[in-house]
Amino acid sequence: MQDQKIIELIRSNKNDQALLALYKNFPAVKKMIRLNSGNAADAEDIFQEALIILCRKIKETGFVLNAQLSTYLFSVCRFLWKDELKKRKHRLVNDFEAGIDQLEELQLKDQVAEEERIKLAERVIGDLGDRCREVLLLFYNSGLKLKDIATKMGYSSENTAKNQKYKCLEAAKNRLKEMKRPRETFH
Amino acid sequence: MRNELEQISIIEKYLNNELSAEEKAAFEKNLQADPQLQEALTLQQEIMKGIDNLSMKQKIHWAKKRYYRNRNITRWGLTSLIVIAVVTAIIIYSGKNKSQSSIKELPALPAFNEQHRNEWADADKKIPPQKFLITMGRDTIVETKAGMIIQVPANGFLTGDKQPVTGQIELTIKEAMDAAGIISAGLSSTSGDQLLESAGMFLIDARQNENILAVNPVAGLYLELPTDTIHPGMKLFSGKRMTDGRIDWVAPQPLERTLTPVDINQLNFYPPRYLDSLAKWGYNTNNKKFTDSLYYSYSHFFREYETAVEESRESYGANSYNNINECAINPAKIKAIWGEKYQNTLLATREFEERLNQIHQTGKNVVLDLYVNNLDKTLSEIDSMAVKNLKGAFKQRFLAFAARHDGAIKINSALTQKLRQYYDTKTKTFMDAVAQTRRAFWEKQEHLDKEANQKQTAHTMDSLKRIADRFNEELQLNLKRTYSQLGYNSPPRLPGANVYKARITATGWYNVDRIVTEATITRTTLNISDAATGKNASIRYEPVSFAVNNAPQYDDLYIYLLPEKLNSFIRLPVANDKYTERLNELIKYKLVCVGYKGEQAFYYMQPGIEPKAYTNIELQSVSASELNRLLNREGNGRHEAGIQKDLAFYLYYKKESQRQKHNLELLEFTWKVQTIIWYYRGEGVPCCCFGDSYK
């Protein structure tokens, strides 16, 4: 699939085909990580994170692709793996460079930090009841219409469904607030 | 709506850019003034992103699964091209379908269900159908939206009058693979009163021009349901539509776990610990040629065992050896199956690799034979057969294998038969070949050993003779000089046994002879005065030494002194890279040095050697023929033959000791590896002990 097509698909939220196309880059990433003291599971984690970052970047309004998508994805993976190795206090191989320019690297650093923050939110949503999680996922990512969601989830009306969604959002927000608070008091 | 919910709703609109200009301005104004609102906004933003990420991760997970599945499909070999074509056609087709399915009305149900009855469950009505057009007469693979893979064989369906269907058919799939799907379709996972754990529910219905088709019971359809983890004991239930719209699940069948063949060369058929041990000892385990030939070479034991058993039967009437076929797997058998012939059979699966690892440890060749000779059965069936040959822990392990219900790889019976023969003959031929090669090798080594022994004896005799000759020659010279110094005219003679006896009364001469002889033996300076004549005689021996530049860099270095008046030559002994000798003042010496670095020869010659320390001797490289010519020239007739013979022996000896050392290492290594291949039974007792066990 051509890069432009992949970008279009991601921008219009039709990720499935785009992700499948992007997955073809996985073997190269796996090889790179294995050659640099990682294993297959590390490779999958890094690749998943890189895909999320890539998709998020593509959706940003100002995104311009300067290289091939596969090259860019590979660079992000290298960057992430380098970062991970640093965390694990591995001595770095000399020539192990992410191969991206400094500005890009700074942006990526911000984005990785942001993803770290979002992981907390992900955990909160994961901890919600099954039904609440289902409602939120359906509302924000299935592309289904309110009416369909109401039918699918067995709500009597669209309004109930909407109300339920807000309640679940509220629960998630409160939980996230709680989880953040103890940390802040330590600062 | 409550205030809090109202706030959430507004923030959401703000984030989605759905507020009007005024509303937006007002909101932003509030935002600046209200830190609590700021916090709420941040929290909501993060939650939204969290939701986004979760859903992304789900999609990535699916992409991963599909990626691996597609890769496997392309690896399925010959049919892959057709398969891919079909799969893409279906994706497009079902894609079309998808756009239609957003229309809320589901297509109407046909008049009768697949059992020719007018009964419908809620699920039939609620789940949108996925339809696939399939051309019969060739094998087809389809993939559903949820990732279920259905293999439809060429003759997979029968018409009402039990004839294979030809032409196009329409395959309808309805599936509910996750909890949401199952619940929203009104399905439940109960069988009678029992609660089931479901891995997914599906309906398969096939029609041709509205005629209901039946699955051909001989061919069968073959399904793969995607799952994250394999739970043991999963079964396939058939659905029975109930009058209240539910479906009851009945008649459970054990699921067959099917096998996916992989490249047989990527599997590890060696005994456990074999590669690890070789790696530990510093061998390159990536060199399969080496690891193969090493491992397969052990099959000679099995050949020798057969011979030994035959012989022992002839002499003692019964087999007096432990049965080797219960001790270790015959490497010739592994050689027979580990190759292209067995690609795409059940031996070329990870599942068989797992069993083989255990089979190696049981040491039972009959168990391996079971797997190889029953390629048309399911692995699970063969596991059960293997259990009968095993005891204790191994029996338990193979019972556990059987419980996995691992399936088969389709193979036709003619090929099975052919492979069975191939296995037998190949094993036998290979065993013979290895035994023969080994015998030839060791017989040749034995011959070489004998030859080396003879050569060494001959050289020792030569050296002894040369030393004796040289001694006699030098003694004669010394005697002659001493006599003349003392004023005797008698011709010098050797102190031979007869002469000695005859002259026992002639004390003066006797003394002289003895002293000269002693001096010649010890190579020390001689000073005597004769009482009868009052004259003095002396022969001086003075030390000389030679140091060659970079002596340690030579593999071999030989320093010779060639006495000009004598026929013999002296090879100098070495200590601390210094070659020393004592020079007889009566004799002129020539120095000849020969060095070797590998096959390259080096040479140095200097005549007129004086008693002193020579250093910085620099050898020049010469060709082998040039060295011969030089030795001939400097050797003065008879010397050269001796030196060349001496050198030739040393070169031979060097190669010979390398050969012997290599053989010794080979034997030690063979023994070491053998302990890995042979599983030991009991307390350190090798399970097989017969024949020439160190070779």
Image: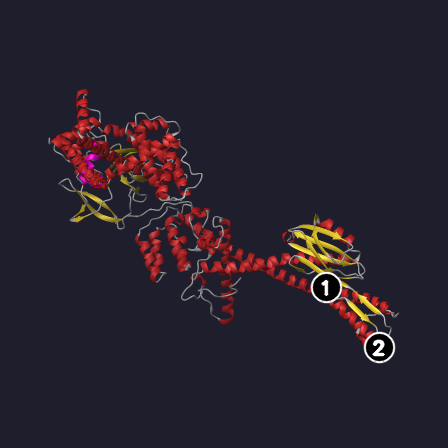
- What coloring was used for the rendering? secondary structure
Label annotation for residue B462: 1
Query: In the depicted view, which residue is nearer to us: B353 or B525?
Result: B525
**Figure quadrant of the N terminus of chain B:** top left
Instruction: Give the magenta part as a residue range.
Output: A125-139
SS at mark 2 in the image: loop
Identify the image quadrant of residue B20.
Answer: top left
Chain letter, disc 1 residue: B
Q: Which mark is residue A159?
A: none
Q: Image check: B640 left or right of B169?
A: right
Rendered image quadrant of residue A8: top left
Q: Residue at x 68, y 62 (%)?
A: B455
User: Callout 1: helix, strand or loop?
Assistant: helix
When the figure is inspected, residue B388 is found, relative to residue B92, above or below; the finding is below
Type of residue at label 2? Ala
Instruction: Report the front residue among A16 and B601.
Output: B601
- Horizontal relation, residue B296 to residue B488: left or right: left
